[in-house]
Image (cartoon, rainbow, N blue to C red):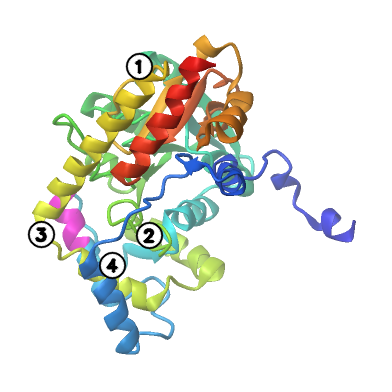
Amino acid sequence: MQVERRLSSRAAGFTESVIREMTRKANAAGAINLAQGFPDFAAPDPLKEAACRAIRDDHNQYAITWGTQRLREGLASKVARYNGMDFDPETEVTVSCGSTEAMIASMLALVDPGDEVVVIEPFYENYGPDTAIAGATPVFVPSGAEFAIDEDALAAAFGSKTRAIVLNTPNNPTGRVYTAGELRAIADLCIDHDAYAFVDEIYEHILYDGHRHLSLGSLPGMEDRTVTIGSFSKTYSVTGWRVGYALADRRLSGAIRKVHDFLTVGAPAPLQEACAAALDLPSAYYDDLAALYDRKRRLLHDGLTRAGLQCELPEGAYYLFCDISGFDTDDLRFADFLVEQVGVAAVPGSSFFAEGGSDRIRFTFSKRDETLVEACRRLERLNEM
């Protein structure tokens, strides 16, 4: 009881991660895990070799708190080239323990108790708890048709207490890639209300059908009010390495670095060296990555369609967000049914909404082809039930 009394009331409004709970259920049931978004295939050999080499070369002690010089310089160069943003690696690039830490460090640094943070639904499940931990109030804004930004609803959500907005593009769970027009509307609201933007761009290289990634922070007027958050986890299939980053102007980065220092001290030193090597991979790597996931999204989409699960092909990221309204059940019961009776794990849609989402379920296709083929075979049992 003494421990329970010490728990912050800020934690009372949310539960543990539904996504990671579905992984535990999948492991217990021996089900195929299409819930949590991590690959079941190998990371690129050059990265693994670089990590081993870094350990052998004794990069095994603390790196400088905000990241090794080589990695920060590499990130600044990459972002200038790919994202169209200029950052000083000495003062404006902060390496973190994954994008998860980058987001909460940024919120704790820049959001005060009593502030409001706008969160667009559906959203990655950490954003609401992050806001609450920072002492702020999340203001949830539903998406419009086909998960586009509803500009009227978004404008109505901004007010005198708005300190920031959280954005994720390409989006998890919908796969939506926000357009230049949508981003410009968000930028205008941030400028008009003197608000920050925390932009999670972790899937920036996983794009399909000619879609191009555009960073909100590259738009005029957003240079000094955007925190761009990224990670090596998805692009390089190393979700367990926990190396991410926050990019922001000197003023914002100074505050973020202070919080980051006391949260985690720093990301793993040898893995930072390996991530720096990842940034030297040729452009063909990213083309091949997108082609790889394009094949996998079509493979799983075809299987889900055969099983009677309706979903659109995503524009980016590596998830399929399915409509289960035809199954006369809700997402929680359906997810448990899939794990226990079908042998496939997915994420209940309500975990991506403050309210609603019970007619949705999310699958990841970040798996080997043979894993996806077997999952599709099992899902076809739905036609017999």
* 231 or 112, nearer to the observer: 231
Q: Which residue is mark 2?
A: 244
Percent position of residue 100, x then y: 47, 53
- Do callouts 4 and 2 mark residues in contact (Cβ within 8 Å)? no
- Look at mark 3 in the image and give the residue it sits on: 282
Residue placed under numbered mark 4 in the picture: 275
- Residue 222 is at least partly visible in this image: no
Question: Which mark sits nearer the N-terminus, 1 or 3?
Answer: 1
Residue 316, position in %: x, y? 28, 34
320 vs 95: above or below: above
Label 3 sits on a secondary structure element that is: loop
Which of the two labelled residues, at mark 1 and mark 4, occupies the earlier sequence position?
1
Residue found 16% across the figure and 29% down from its top: 209
Q: Which residue is mark 1?
A: 146
* Mark 2 → mark 3, Cα distance in angstroms: 20 Å
Please tell me which of labels 2 and 3 falls first in the chain.
Answer: 2
Give the spatial CA distance, label 4 vs label 2: 10 Å
State which mark lies toward you, 1 or 3: 3
Assign a secondary structure to mark 1: helix
Magenta segment boundaries in residue numbering: 76-83
Q: Is residue 104 left or right of residue 270?
A: right
Nearest-to-viewer mark from 4 and 2:
4
| Amino acid type for the residue under numbered disc 1 | Glu
> How far separated are the C-alphas under marks 1 and 4?
35 Å
Question: Which element type, helix, strand or loop, lies under badge 4?
Answer: helix
- Image point 64% across, 25% down: which residue? 333
At label 2, which amino acid type do we have? Gly
Give the quarter of the figure containing the C terminus.
top right
Q: How many marks?
A: 4
Counting residues from the start of the chain, the first of labels 1 and 2 encountered is 1
Name the residue: 62% across, 27% down: 332
